[in-house]
């Protein structure tokens, strides 16, 4: 095969931007990995990598692959510089400020907020014996919890959620109509206008919340500008809320579809970390991570030219048989899962990315999902899919269920705050440390 000419999709293959692919990408990953692991998509002149080793290489070789594509995607809606586009000392210093807001003592306090938000949002549904885990609970829950951490007013959650949804749409859309583009930019402007008076107030009268910490933080002896603080708030809002509700819904879908594993987790909640890690491996909510090739580079016989946009296909990489045995099976007992390191920089799955830009919220996401799942499992007795609901997922960039209607035995006297809400003893209190990486 001559250099630079990618192998065409195997017979019966579909393009990664087709509707058929979006309907169920998992059906196509094996063919991509085996026959077209460095897939070129001519309509957007971008490359899609599906093998675990190639994806890991892109995410950790920071000299060859930069986050410049993210910068272009994020800049118009983030109003300032976000972590993904920073490098060197600025990235290390500002990342540390955000990490501190989500780990250690701060995390222990946040677990209380996670529990009370979950109890409040669940209460109306318990006597009904039915809940849509995505729309009734997961989405509002993930936004409420993130607003609590940031110190923003939860009474405004609906409009904040609508604005940050528009921002996320801008960043994660492969193509966008002019109307949608205008809508997304409008969302960013409105959210910025909402945040500026809050920032001003926290500079005058700081609290313990993340917005106050960002306002008080200095880089190179200089306080961050309003624009810098705004961008980091948007960064956390968008990064935290979207994948968390998807992971929670996917965890319950997998457990309900595997009754023996559901029964095992109910019997032994210490299995929850493994169930969450396996959910993230099998169905990662962030499916694509973009990078730009800074120089000509080769994958096998194929040359990816300098300047090219490269998409890491996390869903495909996590199901690579070279990385995990029986990779298409949900098995929280799998010996190669490595639960303890699944939420650290040493994770074998790539759901949190890898390298310097690996997710800063991994420990928080784990606490959030494990805490709420530990609350839900004893409450949702006999939990099952609603019989008349067809399951559907959506999204190429971030992916999750459109809805997850569930039925369970109604809880007659809803007193969720009096229900024991165990916090898994094994919750981590430290962020992923890149020093801890064992590759
Ligand atoms: C299950 C939940 C989550 C998943 C699957 C997830 C996934 C990811 C991934 C794949 C990246 C790497 C992007 C890249 O390399 O370009 C990332 C980065 C990031 N995540 Fe998460 N995330 C989750 C939850 C959270 C939470 C709760 C927060 C809140 C603090 C958060 C904040 C961030 C930030 C700020 C970055 C950028 C880090 C940097 O560029 O240095 N994430 N996340």
Image (cartoon, grey):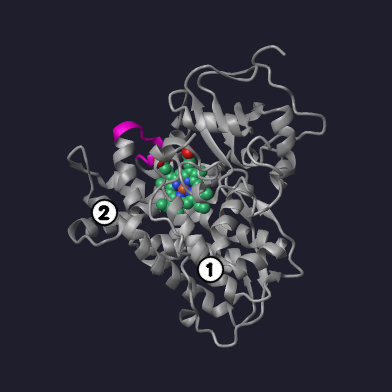
Of mark 1 and mark 2, the one earlier in the sequence is: 2
Q: Does any atom of ligand 1 lie closer than 8 Å to the CB of label 1?
A: no
Q: In the rendered image, is residue 167 in sight?
A: no
Dot 1: element: helix
Position of 50 relative to 204 (above/below): above
What residue appears at the point 50 percent right and 45 percent down from the top-left corner? 352
Q: Which of marks 1 and 2 is in front?
A: 1
- Residue closer to the observer: 432 or 387: 432
Q: In the rendered image, is residue 414 in sight?
A: yes
Residue corresponding to mark 1: 374
Residue corresponding to mark 2: 213
What residue appears at the point 32 percent right and 38 percent down from the top-left corner? 92
Q: Position of residue 428 (x, y in %)?
A: 42, 55
Q: Give the range drawn in magenta.
A: 81-89
Whether residue 335 is in magenta: the answer is no
Res. 224 mark? none
- Residue closer to the observer: 314 or 320: 320
Q: Where is residue 163 in the image (x, y as percent from the top left)?
A: 45, 55
Give the side of residue 200 with respect to residue 23, left or right: left
Give the side of residue 203 with respect to residue 433, left or right: left
What residue appears at the point 59 percent right and 71 percent down from the top-left corner? 377
Position of 137 relative to 300 (above/below): below
Q: How far apart are marks 1 and 2 (CA)?
A: 30 Å
Dot 2: element: helix
- Quick check: marks 1 and 2 in contact, CB under 8 Å? no
Q: Position of residue 439 (x, y in %)?
A: 49, 34
Quadrant of residue 391 within the rendered picture: bottom right
Position of 353 relative to 212 (above/below): above
């Amino acid at each position: 095969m001559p250099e630079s000419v990618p192998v065409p999709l195997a017979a019966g293959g579909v393009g990664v931007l087709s509707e058929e692919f979006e309907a169920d990408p998992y059906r196509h990953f094996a063919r991509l990995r085996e026959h077209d692991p460095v897939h070129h998509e001519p309509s957007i002149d971008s490359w899609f990598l599906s093998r675990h080793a190639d994806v890991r290489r892109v995410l950790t070789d920071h000299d060859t692959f930069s986050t410049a594509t993210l910068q272009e995607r994020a800049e118009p809606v983030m109003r300032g510089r976000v972590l993904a586009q920073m490098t060197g000392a600025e990235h290390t210093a500002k990342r540390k400020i955000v990490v501190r807001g989500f780990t250690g003592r701060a995390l222990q306090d946040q677990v209380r907020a996670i529990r009370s938000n979950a109890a409040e949002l669940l209460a109306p549904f318990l006597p009904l014996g039915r809940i849509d885990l995505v729309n009734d609970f997961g989405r509002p829950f993930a936004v409420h919890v993130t607003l609590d951490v940031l110190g923003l007013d939860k009474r405004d959650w609906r409009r904040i959620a609508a604005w940050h949804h528009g921002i996320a749409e801008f960043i994660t859309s492969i193509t966008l109509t002019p109307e949608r583009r205008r809508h997304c930019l409008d969302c960013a402007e409105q959210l910025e206008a909402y945040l500026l008076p809050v920032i001003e107030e926290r500079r005058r009268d700081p609290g313990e919340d993340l917005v106050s910490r960002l306002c008080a933080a200095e880089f190179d002896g200089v306080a961050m500008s309003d624009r810098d603080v705004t961008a980091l708030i948007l960064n956390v809002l968008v990064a935290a809320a979207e994948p968390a509700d998807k992971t929670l819904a996917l965890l319950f879908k997998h457990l309900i579809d595997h009754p023996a594993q559901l029964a095992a987790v109910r019997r032994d909640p210490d299995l929850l970390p493994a169930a969450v890690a396996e959910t993230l491996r099998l169905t990662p909510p962030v499916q694509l991570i973009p990078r730009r090739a800074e120089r000509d580079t080769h994958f096998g016989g194929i040359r990816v030219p300098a300047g090219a946009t490269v998409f890491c296909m996390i869903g495909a990489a996590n199901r690579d048989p070279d990385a995990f045995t029986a990779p298409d099976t949900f098995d929280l007992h799998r010996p190669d899962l490595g639960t303890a390191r699944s939420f650290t920089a040493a994770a074998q799955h790539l759901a949190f990315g890898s390298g310097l830009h690996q997710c800063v919220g991994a420990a928080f996401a784990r606490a959030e999902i494990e805490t709420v799942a530990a609350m839900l499992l004893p409450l949702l007795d006999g939990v099952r899919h609603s019989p008349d609901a067809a399951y559907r997922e959506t999204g190429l960039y971030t992916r999750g269920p459109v809805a997850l209607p569930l039925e369970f035995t109604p809880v007659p006297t809803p007193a969720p705050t009096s229900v024991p809400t165990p916090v898994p003893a094994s919750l981590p209190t430290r962020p992923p440390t890149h020093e801890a990486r064992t590759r």
